[in-house]
Amino acid sequence: MATNSDYSGLFIVLEGIDGTGKSTQTQRLASYFSALGWEVVLSREPTDGPWGKKLRESATTGRLEPEQELEYFLLDRKEHVENLILPSLKDGKVVILDRYYFSTMAYQGCRGFDPAEIRRRNEEFAPRPDHLFVLDIDVGTALQRIGHRGDTANHFEKTDSLQRCRDIFLTLAGESFVHVIPARGTPDEITLQIIDFLEAKK
Ligand code: TYD
């Protein structure tokens, strides 16, 4: 496994179920680090690469079989790690990701795979972040935020599976690099909580 001693950059990941505001917060964090003079790489998974595109398409054209879906997330991530994440960290940049392998633990975990096994397979090639912020809200609030009315949900957004995803994310709490951030507040309040935490670590 690549560890943080292998690079001089800073690796930050935001996770959480759909509707927790990850993309807003990753953008705000990117501005924060740019203002401090860091070179920032902001990215997301699934990526816009070939495997990521197939995964995004599958949200509208029909969900892939569980094995194939898991395989595509792994292939997408391998490419992301090799071509963008590790080179940027080695160049001393701050890399901020909207989703990473903890999403695979949660989302493919709730399709029946063992989250611990998914983690093991990922950590064979994917570096662990310096900081993982899990934005956490209850599933009801999350569904309201993504405009779910019970009839138009796509397959990623069903209530019971989101609840199981949330539970898997919360099993990460307590590890030294993991910070669970209650995400019911305003975007400003959530940004402040994340930044306060990062400043305390300096
Ligand atoms: P999301 O970031 O919510 O995409 P968008 O910006 O299009 O809303 O991610 C799309 C979905 O992919 C999301 O519901 C979670 C799912 N996902 C997995 O199932 N496994 C994974 O490993 C990742 C990274 C995402």
Image (cartoon, rainbow, N blue to C red):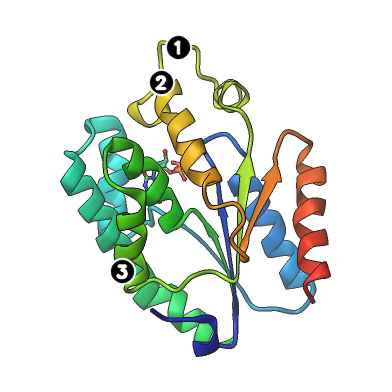
**Residue at 46%, 30% in the rendered image:** 162
**Residue at 72%, 71% in the rendered image:** 34
Residue 105 locus on image (x, y percent): 38, 50
**Does mark 2 have its CB less than 8 Å from ligand 1?**
no
Residue 98 locus on image (x, y percent): 53, 54
Residue 10 locus on image (x, y percent): 61, 76
**Residue at 31%, 35% in the rendered image:** 59
**Residue 78 — which label?**
3
The residue lying toward the viewer, choosing from 160 and 24, is: 160
The residue lying toward the viewer, choosing from 175 and 145, is: 175
**Helix, strand or loop at disc 1?**
loop
Q: CA distance from mark 2 to mark 1?
A: 6 Å
Residue 106 locus on image (x, y percent): 41, 44
Decide if residue 192 is on the left or right side of residue 72: right
Rendering quarter of residue 91: bottom right
Which amino acid type is marked by label 3? Lys
> Which quadrant of the figure shows ligand 1?
top left
**Residue at 23%, 32% in the rendered image:** 61
Disc 1 marks which residue? 150
Rendering quarter of residue 40: bottom right
Which amino acid type is marked by label 2? Ala
- Residue 139 against residue 115 in the figure, above or below: above
Which amino acid type is marked by label 1? Gly
